[in-house]
Image: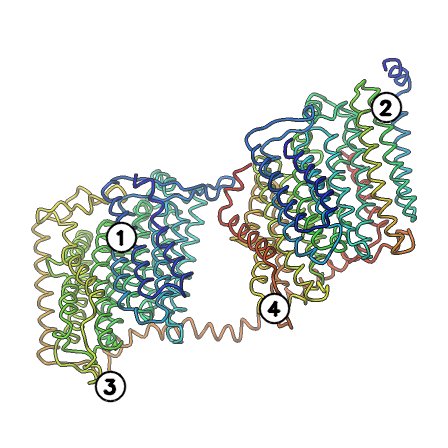
C-alpha cells in the first residue's frame, strides 16, 4: 500500500518537475522515487497485509515480483540519461509515464479481486501506448503506438468480457470466492468456461504468447529502443506474476480444462518465435522474437502448476530482465554509432574495438540462450524441472529442442561480434550507462553461480 | 433498488446475455472489418459498453452491487483509453494525413 | 570456534590471488611473494588449530547451493581427520614452496602473476580436499587442473612448454570425463552426491554390486589421469617444463595426490568393489615398477624425479587397491615431504647452474652447495627406504600389506624399490660427487642459494627425516598413531588385525634394508669409484637399454596408435563424414528451418486487421474445444 502510494506520488511529482525543464533534477528524482519505493516494498517482506477492502494483498509473492520490477525500471531509467541526452523536452513525462506503468504493474502482482486486475492491466497499458509513440515524428513509432493501442484495447475488451462471464456464473470478483465456487459446484455453467478462455486470451496477449503475439515484433521494433527494453521487462514480469496468481488460485481446480489450451499455445509459441528469429536481420526484431520464445518457456512454469512454479517463474523473469536490459543497452550504443543501423552486421568486429560491450552483450546472449554459469541456465533448468515434476515430459523435451534451436540465432550475433571483421570504431561509453551494464552483467553471473538465493525466496 | 431488481429479474437472464453478446460481436466485427481508425475506436467502445450492460444485468440478478460498481470503473478506464487513443490518432493523422489502418504496415517480417 | 570459521580457510589464498592479480602493476615482486606466502601461512595455522580441536567429522554448512526437485547439493565443507591431513600437507608444504619461490622466481618479470596462480592453485586444492560432496570436489579438481595448465605453460614464450601444457590438459580431460560420468551415475544410483548421504547409503549395498563397481571404475579413471598412472601418465614428465617450484608443489606434493585422496575419501565405495580394487592393484604395481625402470636411464634431473613421482604414486595406488587406505595416505604425507625436498633441491642445483638440467653436466657440487647436498641426501635416503628416514616406514608398510595379500606382490614391489634406490643414488652421485663436468662459465657461477631458499630445504629435510615417526609401527612398540587418527574417515578392514607375524615382518624389513644397502654400494662403485657418466645423446644404444632410455617408446606408441590414426581418420574419413553426412544433415535441417522461418515471417505481414483476425479465429477454435470437452 505504502509502495503504491509512493510510486504514484513520485510519478505526479515528476510531471510538475517537468515545468522546471531541468534534467539535473528529473533523473535523480525518478531514481530516488524508485529507491524509496523499493525500500518500502522490501520492508513488506514477511509482513503480509491486505488493502482496499481485501481487493489487493501484499504477500511475499508480490513483494518479490515488485522488487524485480523496480530493479528493472531502475536500470532502464539509468540508461535513459544517455538515451535522452539530446532530447530537450518531455523527458520527465516519459519517466512519469514509466512510474505509472509500474503502478499498474504493482496492482496486478498483488490483486485478489478481478476489478483490481482489470484496473491494473489498464493502468499498465495506457501509459505504454503513449510511451511506444513517444518519438512523435517517427512514422515507425506512430505505427507501433497505434498498433499496440488498437490490439491492446481489443484484448482488454475480451479480457473484460471474460471477467464478466466468470462473474455472471460465480457472482463474485474475489479470487478466493471464485475458487470456493469452483470447488463447491458440481456442474459449472458454460459461461464460466467461456470466461476462463477469454481471460486466458487476454493474458496471452499481454505476455505475447502465440497466436496472440502478433503485436510484439512490430511494436518492439517500432518503439524507441529504451521503451522496448522497458516493455520487454516490466510488462513481462508483471504479466506473468498476474497470470500465475490468477490461474494458480482461482482456476487451479479445473486445471484439466485449461491446461490443454496452454499446452497448444506453448508449442505454437516456441515454434513460431524460434523459427522466425532464425531469419531476422535486425537485432531489435530478433530480440523481440526471443522475448516471445521466453514467454513460451515461462508458460511451462504456469502449466506445471506445482510448488516449484512460483520460484521458477520469478527466477526466470528476473534472469530474463537482467539479460534483456544490457542487450538493449548495447544495442542502443551500437545503433547510435552506426547511423541507426540495427542489423546484425552492425555488430561485426565489436569485440576488437569495444571488448567491454562485446562481453556484456555475450553474457546477456548466453544467459538468454541458457548456457551454464549464467542465470539463464538455471532459469530454464528450474522451469524444466517444474514441468517434468508435473508430468509434462514430452512438452519439456520439445522445449529443450526449442532452446537448442534458440542457441543458433544467439550465436549468429556472437559470431558477428567476435569472428567477423568490421569497420568498427571505438564507442565511448557514458559512465552511468557503463556502470548499469556492468551491474546487470555481474548480477547475471552471480545468479548463475548462486541460484539458490533467488529460487529460495518463493 | 429491490423493486428495480425484481423488475429486471422478470426477464430471463438469457435474454440479456444474448443481447449483450450480440452487441459485443457487432463490435468485434466492426473492429475486424472496418478500416477507418475512428470507426474502429467506436466499435471498441461498443464492445466495452455491451460488457457494461451485461455486468449490470448480472449484478441485478445476483443482487450483488459489485458488478455495478465495476461498471463505473470500466467507464472511467474507457474514457482514459479513448483519450489516449484519439491523441495517438491525431498524431497519426498529422504524420500520415490519413486514418486508414491499412497504411500501418511498415513494420513487418 | 575454529570450526565455525573453517569456511574462511580457502578464502585467504583466493584473496591472495585477487590482490596479486589486480595489484600486478603496483606491488613489487618480493612483496607479492610475501603476500602470497602469508595467505598460505594463515590457513596453515587454522589447519593446525583444527587438527588439535577436531577428532571426528564436522560439517561446515555455508549455503544451499543447488536444490531442485530431488537434487539437493549444499555448499558444505567436511572437516575430518582425512581432510585435515590433506589441508596440513597442502598448506604446510605449499607455504614452504611459496617461501622458496620468493628466492627462485625473484628475477622473473612475471613473478606477480606466478604468485597469483600459485595462490589460486592452493585455493582450488583446499576446495578439493575440504568439499563435502563430489561436486565441490570436482570443481576443485578442475580448478587445480586449470592452474596446473597455466603454470606449466608459465613461460609461454616457449612453444615446447606450451605443448606440454596442452598435453597435460588433454590427458586430464580424458580422466575428468570418467570422473564426471562417475558422479552423474552416482547421482542416479544414490540420488545424491553428498558424502553424508552416499556413504551411509552404500552401507546397505552388497559387496560386488555392479553399479558400485562401475561408479568406482569411472572415478578411478579420473584418478588415473590426475595421479598420472598407466595409461594416462605421459603428461607428468612433460609437465616438468614448468618452473621447478611448480613441479614441487603441483606435480609432486599435492595435485597429483588428489586422485589418491579421492579414492581414500570414497574408501567405503571401493571396499565394496573388489573388482575395481583388483584393477587398482595391478595398475598401481605396474606403474610403480615401469616408471621406476624408466627412471634408471634418464639424464634430465627433473625427468628422473618426475618418473620417480609416477612410480611412488603407483605404490600409493597399490596400497589403495589392497584396502590399506591409511598406508596410502601415510605415503602421500611422507612423499610430499621428501619429493618436494628433492624438487626444491634440484631447483637449487639448477639455480646454481643457471638452469642446467642435464646431470651429465653436473658433478662435484658437494662442497659448493653444502646445504643442498645434505638435505638432498636426506631426501634420497628417505625415498630409497633406508631406516629411520620417513620413506622407510611408509613404503615398508605398503610392502608389508602387499606381502600379507600375496607374497609375489611383495617381490614385484621390491624390484621397484630397488630401481628407485638405484636411480636416486645414481642421480645423487652424479650431481654431488666426482668432478664438475659443466662449462667453466657455469663453474664460476656456482653458488649456494640464498637463505630464503635454503630454509625451506632445511625444514623439509627435518620433516623428511622425522615424518616416519608419525606412524611408528607396532612392531617397534609404536602406536601407529597416524592410522588411528585417520580411522573415523576411512573404511578399514585392517584395523585391529595383525596381518603377518612380527618375525616375518622383521625378516622382510631386514632383507629389504640389506638389499638396498647393497644397491647403494653398487651405485657408489659405478658412479663414484669408476666415475661412469651416462653416454651422450649421439651414442648408439642397443637392445633393452635403447628401449628403456626411450621410455619404452610409449610416447611414440601413443603417437602411432592414437595420434596418427586420428589424423588419418580426421583427414580422410571424418572429413568425408563431415562433408557429406553432417553437412547434409545440417543443411537439410537448415533448409527446413529456413522454410519454416520464411512461412512464419509471412504471417507477420504488418497488417493489424489480419492480426486481429488470427486472434478472433484462435478464440473461435478455443470455443470449439470447449464444446468438444
Is residue B100 visible to the viewer in this orientation of the structure?
A: yes
Q: Which residue appears farthest toward the front when viewing the image?
A: A20
Q: Nearer the viewer, mark 2 or mark 3?
A: 2
Color style of the picture: rainbow
- The answer to whether marks 2 and 3 sit on the same chain is no
* Residue C596 percent coordinates (x, y): 73, 58
Point out which mark residue B57 bears. Answer: 2
**Pointer 2 with pointer 3, Cβ within 8 A:** no
- Label 1 neighbourhood size at 10 Å, few (<14), some (14-19), many (20+)? many
> Foreground mark, 4 or 2?
4
Q: Earlier in the sequence, mark 1 or mark 3?
A: 1
Name the quadrant containing residue C63.
top left
Residue under disc 2 on the same chain as residue under disc 1: no
Select label 2 or label 1 by which is in front: 2
Name the subunit of mark 1.
C
Q: Is residue C312 above or below residue A439?
A: below
Quadrant in the picture for residue A32: top right
Identify residue for label 1.
C320
Residue A402: x %, y % from top left: 64, 53
Quarter of the image with the N terminus of chain A in it = top right
Residue at image mark 3: C539
Residue at 86% across, 15% down: B1
Amino acid at each position: 500500500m505504502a509502495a503504491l502510494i509512493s510510486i504514484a506520488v513520485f510519478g505526479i511529482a515528476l510531471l510538475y518537475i517537468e515545468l522546471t525543464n531541468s534534467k539535473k533534477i528529473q533523473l535523480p528524482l525518478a531514481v530516488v522515487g524508485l529507491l524509496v519505493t523499493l525500500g518500502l516494498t522490501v520492508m513488506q517482506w514477511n509482513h503480509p497485509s491486505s488493502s482496499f477492502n481485501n481487493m489487493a494483498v501484499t504477500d511475499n509473492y508480490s513483494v518479490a515480483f515488485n522488487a524485480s520490477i523496480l530493479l528493472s525500471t531502475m536500470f532502464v531509467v539509468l540508461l535513459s540519461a544517455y538515451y535522452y541526452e539530446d532530447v530537450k523536452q518531455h523527458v520527465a513525462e516519459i519517466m512519469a509515464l514509466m512510474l505509472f506503468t509500474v503502478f499498474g504493474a504493482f496492482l496486478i502482482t498483488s490483486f485478489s479481486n478481478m476489478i483490481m486486475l482489470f484496473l491494473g492491466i489498464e493502468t499498465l497499458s495506457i501509459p505504454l501506448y503513449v510511451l511506444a509513440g513517444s518519438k512523435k515524428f517517427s512514422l515507425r513509432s506512430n505505427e507501433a503506438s497505434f498498433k499496440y493501442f488498437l490490439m491492446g484495447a481489443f484484448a482488454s475488451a475480451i479480457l473484460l468480457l471474460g471477467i464478466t462471464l466468470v462473474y455472471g456464473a460465480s457472482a463474485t470478483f474475489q479470487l478466493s470466492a471464485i475458487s470456493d465456487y469452483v470447488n463447491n459446484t458440481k456442474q459449472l455453467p458454460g459461461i464460466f468456461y467461456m470466461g476462463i478462455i477469454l481471460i486466458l486470451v487476454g493474458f496471452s496477449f499481454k505476455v505475447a504468447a502465440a497466436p496472440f503475439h502478433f503485436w510484439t515484433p512490430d511494436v518492439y521494433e517500432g518503439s524507441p529502443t529504451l521503451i522496448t527494453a522497458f516493455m520487454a521487462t516490466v510488462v513481462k514480469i508483471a504479466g506473468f506474476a498476474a497470470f500465475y496468481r490468477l490461474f494458480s488460485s482461482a482456476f487451479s481446480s479445473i486445471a484439466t480444462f485449461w491446461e490443454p489450451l496452454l499446452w497448444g499455445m506453448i508449442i505454437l509459441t516456441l515454434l513460431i518465435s524460434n523459427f522466425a528469429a532464425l531469419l531476422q536481420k535486425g537485432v531489435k526484431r530478433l530480440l523481440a522474437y526471443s522475448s516471445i520464445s521466453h514467454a513460451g518457456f515461462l508458460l511451462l512454469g504456469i502449466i506445471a502448476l506445482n510448488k516449484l512454479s512460483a520460484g521458477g517463474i520469478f527466477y526466470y523473469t528476473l534472469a530474463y530482465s537482467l539479460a534483456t536490459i544490457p542487450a538493449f543497452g548495447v544495442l542502443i550504443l551500437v545503433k547510435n554509432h552506426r547511423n541507426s543501423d540495427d542489423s546484425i552486421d552492425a555488430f561485426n568486429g565489436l569485440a576488437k574495438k569495444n571488448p567491454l560491450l562485446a562481453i556484456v552483450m555475450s553474457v546477456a546472449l548466453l544467459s538468454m540462450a541458457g548456457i551454464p554459469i549464467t542465470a539463464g541456465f538455471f532459469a530454464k533448468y528450474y522451469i524444466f524441472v517444474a514441468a517434468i515434476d508435473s508430468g509434462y515430459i514430452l512438452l519439456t523435451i520439445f522445449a529443450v529442442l526449442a532452446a537448442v534451436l534458440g542457441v543458433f540465432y544467439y550465436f549468429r550475433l556472437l559470431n558477428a561480434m567476435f569472428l567477423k571483421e568490421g569497420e568498427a570504431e571505438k564507442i565511448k561509453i557514458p559512465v552511468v550507462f557503463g556502470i548499469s551494464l556492468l551491474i546487470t552483467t555481474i548480477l547475471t553471473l552471480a545468479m548463475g553461480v548462486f541460484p539458490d538465493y533467488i529460487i529460495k525466496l518463493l | 433498488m429491490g423493486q428495480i431488481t425484481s423488475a429486471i429479474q422478470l426477464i430471463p437472464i438469457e435474454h440479456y446475455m444474448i443481447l449483450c453478446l450480440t452487441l459485443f460481436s457487432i463490435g468485434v466485427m466492426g473492429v475486424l472489418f472496418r478500416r477507418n481508425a475512428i470507426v474502429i475506436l467506436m466499435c471498441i467502445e461498443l464492445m466495452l459498453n455491451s460488457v457494461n450492460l451485461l455486468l449490470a444485468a448480472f449484478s441485478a440478478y445476483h443482487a450483488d452491487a459489485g458488478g455495478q460498481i465495476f461498471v463505473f470503473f470500466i467507464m472511467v478506464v474507457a474514457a482514459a483509453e479513448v483519450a489516449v487513443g484519439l491523441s495517438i490518432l491525431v498524431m497519426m493523422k498529422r504524420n500520415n494525413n490519413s486514418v486508414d489502418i491499412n497504411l500501418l504496415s511498415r513494420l513487418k517480417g | 570456534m575454529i570450526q565455525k570459521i573453517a569456511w574462511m580457510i580457502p578464502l585467504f589464498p583466493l584473496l591472495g590471488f585477487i590482490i596479486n592479480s589486480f595489484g600486478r602493476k603496483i606491488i613489487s615482486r618480493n612483496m607479492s611473494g610475501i603476500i602470497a606466502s602469508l595467505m598460505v601461512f594463515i590457513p596453515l595455522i587454522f589447519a593446525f588449530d583444527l587438527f588439535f580441536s577436531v577428532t571426528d567429522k564436522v560439517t561446515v554448512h555455508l549455503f544451499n547451493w543447488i536444490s531442485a526437485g530431488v537434487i539437493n547439493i549444499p555448499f558444505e565443507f567436511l572437516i575430518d581427520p582425512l581432510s585435515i591431513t590433506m589441508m596440513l600437507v597442502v598448506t604446510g608444504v605449499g607455504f614452504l614452496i611459496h617461501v622458496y619461490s620468493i628466492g627462485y622466481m625473484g628475477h622473473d618479470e612475471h613473478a606477480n602473476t606466478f604468485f597469483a596462480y600459485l595462490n589460486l592453485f592452493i585455493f582450488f586444492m583446499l576446495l578439493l580436499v575440504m568439499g563435502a560432496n563430489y561436486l565441490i570436489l570436482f570443481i576443485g579438481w578442475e580448478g587445480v587442473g586449470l592452474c596446473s595448465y597455466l603454470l606449466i605453460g608459465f613461460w609461454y614464450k616457449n612453444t615446447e612448454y606450451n605443448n606440454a601444457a596442452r598435453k597435460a590438459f588433454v590427458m586430464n580431460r580424458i580422466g575428468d570425463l570418467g570422473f564426471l560420468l562417475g558422479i552423474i551415475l552416482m547421482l542416479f544410483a544414490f540420488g545424491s552426491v553428498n558424502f553424508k548421504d552416499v556413504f551411509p547409503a552404500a552401507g546397505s549395498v552388497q559387496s560386488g554390486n555392479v553399479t558400485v563397481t562401475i561408479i568406482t571404475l569411472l572415478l578411478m579413471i579420473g584418478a588415473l589421469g590426475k595421479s598420472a598412472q598407466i595409461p594416462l601418465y605421459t603428461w607428468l614428465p612433460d609437465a616438468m617444463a614448468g618452473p621447478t617450484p611448480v613441479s614441487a608443489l603441483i606435480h609432486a606434493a599435492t595435485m597429483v595426490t588428489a586422485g589418491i585422496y579421492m579414492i581414500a575419501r570414497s574408501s567405503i565405495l571401493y571396499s565394496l568393489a573388489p573388482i575395481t580394487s583388483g584393477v587398482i592393484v595391478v595398475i598401481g604395481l605396474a606403474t610403480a615398477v615401469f616408471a621406476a625402470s624408466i627412471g634408471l636411464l634418464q639424464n634430465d634431473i627433473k625427468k628422473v624425479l618426475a618418473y620417480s613421482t609416477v612410480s611412488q604414486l603407483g605404490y600409493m595406488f597399490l596400497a589403495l587397491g589392497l584396502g590399506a587406505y591409511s598406508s596410502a595416505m601415510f605415503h602421500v604425507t611422507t612423499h610430499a615431504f621428501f619429493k618436494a625436498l628433492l624438487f626444491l633441491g634440484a631447483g637449487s642445483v639448477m639455480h646454481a647452474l643457471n638452469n642446467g638440467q642435464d646431470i651429465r653436466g653436473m658433478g662435484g657440487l658437494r662442497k659448493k652447495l653444502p646445504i643442498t647436498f645434505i638435505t638432498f641426501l636426506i631426501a634420497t635416503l628417505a625415498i630409497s627406504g633406508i631406516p629411520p628416514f620417513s620413506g622407510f616406514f611408509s613404503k615398508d608398510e605398503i610392502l608389508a600389506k602387499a606381502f600379507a595379500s600375496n607374497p609375489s606382490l611383495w617381490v614385484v614391489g621390491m624390484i621397484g624399490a630397488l630401481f628407485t634406490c638405484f636411480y636416486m643414488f645414481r642421480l645423487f652421485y652424479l650431481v654431488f660427487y666426482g668432478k664438475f663436468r659443466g662449462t667453466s662459465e657455469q663453474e664460476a657461477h656456482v653458488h649456494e642459494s640464498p637463505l630464503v631458499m635454503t630454509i625451506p630445504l632445511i625444514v623439509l629435510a627435518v620433516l623428511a627425516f622425522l615424518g616416519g615417526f608419525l606412524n611408528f609401527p607396532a612392531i617397534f612398540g609404536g602406536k601407529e598413531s597416524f592410522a588411528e587418527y585417520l580411522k573415523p574417515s576411512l573404511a578399514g578392514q585392517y584395523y585391529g588385525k595383525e596381518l603377518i607375524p612380527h618375525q616375518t615382518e622383521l625378516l622382510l624389513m631386514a632383507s629389504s634394508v640389506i638389499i638396498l644397502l647393497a644397491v647403494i654400494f653398487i651405485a657408489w662403485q659405478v658412479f663414484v669409484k669408476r666415475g661412469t657418466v651416462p653416454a651422450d645423446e649421439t651414442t648408439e644404444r642397443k637392445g633393452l637399454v635403447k628401449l628403456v632410455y626411450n621410455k619404452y617408446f610409449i610416447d611414440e606408441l601413443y603417437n602411432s596408435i592414437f595420434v596418427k590414426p586420428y589424423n588419418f581418420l580426421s583427414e580422410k574419413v571424418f572429413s568425408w563424414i563431415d562433408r557429406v553426412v553432417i553437412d547434409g544433415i545440417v543443411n537439410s535441417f537448415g533448409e527446413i528451418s529456413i522454410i519454416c522461418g520464411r512461412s512464419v515471417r509471412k504471417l507477420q505481414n504488418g497488417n493489424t486487421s489480419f492480426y486481429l483476425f488470427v486472434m478472433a479465429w484462435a478464440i473461435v477454435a478455443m470455443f470449439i474445444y470447449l464444446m468438444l470437452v
